[in-house]
Amino acid sequence: MADRISEIKEAVIDGMQKVVPGKVQQALDEGIGPETILNEAMINGMAEVGQLFEDGEFFVPEMLVAARAMAAGMEVLKPYLQQADIKATGKVILGTVQGDLHDIGKNLVGMMLEGAAFEVIDLGTDVPPEKFVAAVKESGAQIVAMSALLTTTMPAMKTTIEALENAGVRDQIKIMVGGAPLSDQYAKEIHADGYSPDANRAVSLAKSLIAAA
Ligand code: B12
């Protein structure tokens, strides 16, 4: 099993978009759990890509092909991660904040929320505050979930929360935030209602926010 996991991890790091899905399927067929594949092969692989970038060994194109390879693998994993055994739980507006193009973590959060029977309205990446505001007004969603992966785009979460306040819709919704550079403390500072460090806990957070609404 360790061999298969490290094969997938290396294929993600090397950006082998055509190879990763097949290897993920092989691992699943061998009985390796989807969460093990996700966490130990793919997320660990991306963490290593980040380290290589930081060390000056990888550049943006290498990060990008690795991201594509991971996304291709996630397509295979998706049905295994989701268990459609529960009734509709609530509606969530999801997006990566303005100026930020990272979407792997956001997509993973969306996938897990859908798996827990939330309806997810995905606004994509580089989402301006006014687009979040419009979506809240149009959708009747209970939760707004924002992702940011850059220290330079974290403040866009604050700007978005302020825009929701100014539009008079802040009280209608709960706001949850996430992304690698975030923390519980930052979430509190910008008056978000919750923070989660990963996609699994994002689901329990969303459920508890709905319960508290
Ligand atoms: C892949 C990648 C890219 C790809 C993104 C492709 C894509 N489609 O997403 C590309 C090549 C486009 C890219 C570009 C850039 N990147 Co980049 N990138 C990464 C990398 C390697 C992986 C990110 C990733 O997908 N991780 C895997 C996912 C699963 O993890 P995650 O996103 O953290 O998500 C999890 C949690 O955070 C949480 N979560 C995420 N969102 C949310 C939302 C909610 C509501 C909740 C509850 C939870 C939650 O749940 C997720 C699952 O568990 C990181 C390194 C790293 N270690 O993070 C750098 C990294 C984020 N990038 C970095 C940089 C600097 C850049 C660029 C500025 C580079 C440049 N010079 O151009 C540009 C910026 C482009 C832009 N405007 O956004 C830096 C940021 C440094 C900083 N402190 O700000 C990092 C940390 C690399 C580094 N070590 O220096 N990047």
Image (tube, rainbow, N blue to C red):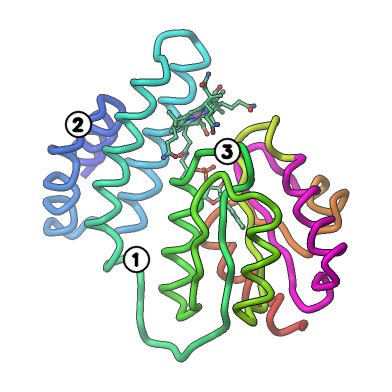
Circles 2 and 1, Cβ within 8 Å, touching? The answer is: no
Judged left or right of residue 99, residue 118 is left
Mark toward the viewer: 2 or 3 = 3
Q: Amino acid at mark 3?
A: Asp
- Locate the N terminus by quadrant: top left
Residue depicted at 56% across the width and 44% down the height? 126
Of callouts 2 and 1, which one flags the residue occurring earlier in the amino acid sequence?
2
Residue topped by disc 3: 100
Of callouts 1 and 3, which one flags the residue occurring earlier in the amino acid sequence?
1
Residue depicted at 19% across the width and 31% down the height? 16
Question: Residue 169: within the magenta?
Answer: yes
CA gap, disc 2 and disc 3: 24 Å
Q: Percent x, y for residue 171?
A: 84, 75
Mark identifier at residue 81? 1
Helix, strand or loop status at disc 2: loop
Residue closest to the far top:
56
Mark 3 vs ligand 1: CB below 8 Å: yes
Judged left or right of residue 165, residue 96 is left
Residue 140 sits above or below residue 22 on the image = below
Residue 24 sits above or below residue 193 on the image = above
Residue topped by disc 2: 16
Mark 2 vs ligand 1: CB below 8 Å: no
- Locate the C terminus by quadrant: bottom right
Q: Percent x, y for residue 48?
A: 42, 26
CA gap, disc 2 and disc 1: 22 Å
Name which quarter of the figure residue 18 lies in.
top left
Mark identifier at residue 40? none
Towards the viewer: 147 or 12: 147
Q: Amino acid at mark 1?
A: Leu
Mark 1 vs ligand 1: CB below 8 Å: no
Helix, strand or loop status at disc 3: loop
**For mark 1, does the 10 Å Cα neighbourhood hold few (<14), some (14 to 19), or many (20 or more) residues?**
some
